[in-house]
Image (cartoon, rainbow, N blue to C red):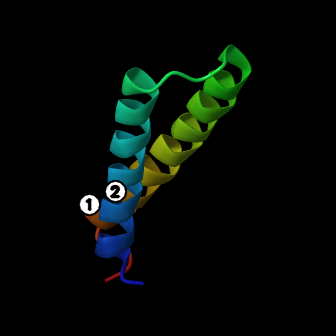
Amino acid sequence: MRPAVLTLVLWLEVLTAVVALELLVFPEVVRLVLWGLVVVGACLALISTTELLRGGRS
């Protein structure tokens, strides 16, 4: 997968997860796990975005 597409997919995943967590009702334990996954996804998206902006992989 191309880096730009991967970055877009990561940001869409983070956005979708945040919207789902705000709109849907989950037990507290599930919400904590999902928020943890959102944080991991956001970190990966930030790393990917930074690399793209630096002109890393093309």
Q: Which quadrant of the figure has residue 52?
A: bottom left
Percent from the top left, x then y, of residue 49?
34, 56
34 displayed left or right of 9: right
What residue is shown with label 2?
A: 49
In front of the other: 18 or 51: 18
State the residue position of label 1: 53
Name the quadrant containing residue 19.
Answer: top left
Frontmost of labels 2 and 1 is 2
Residue 42 drawn above or below residue 30? below
Numbered disc 1: secondary structure: helix
Residue 16's label in the rendered image is: none
Q: In the image, what residue occupies the spot 38% across and 79% down?
A: 57
Amino acid, disc 1? Leu
Q: Quadrant of the C terminus?
A: bottom left
**What crowding class fits label 1: few (fewer than 14 Cα within 10 Å), some (14-19), or many (20 or more)?**
few
Mark 2, other Cα within 10 Å: few <14 / some 14–19 / many ≥20: some
Where does the N terminus fall, quadrant-wise?
Answer: bottom left
Q: CA distance from mark 2 to mark 1?
A: 6 Å
Q: Is residue 1 left or right of residue 35?
A: left
Q: Residue 28: where, in percent of width, then height?
A: 67, 15
The residue furthest right is 29
In percent of width and height, residue 2 lies at 36, 82
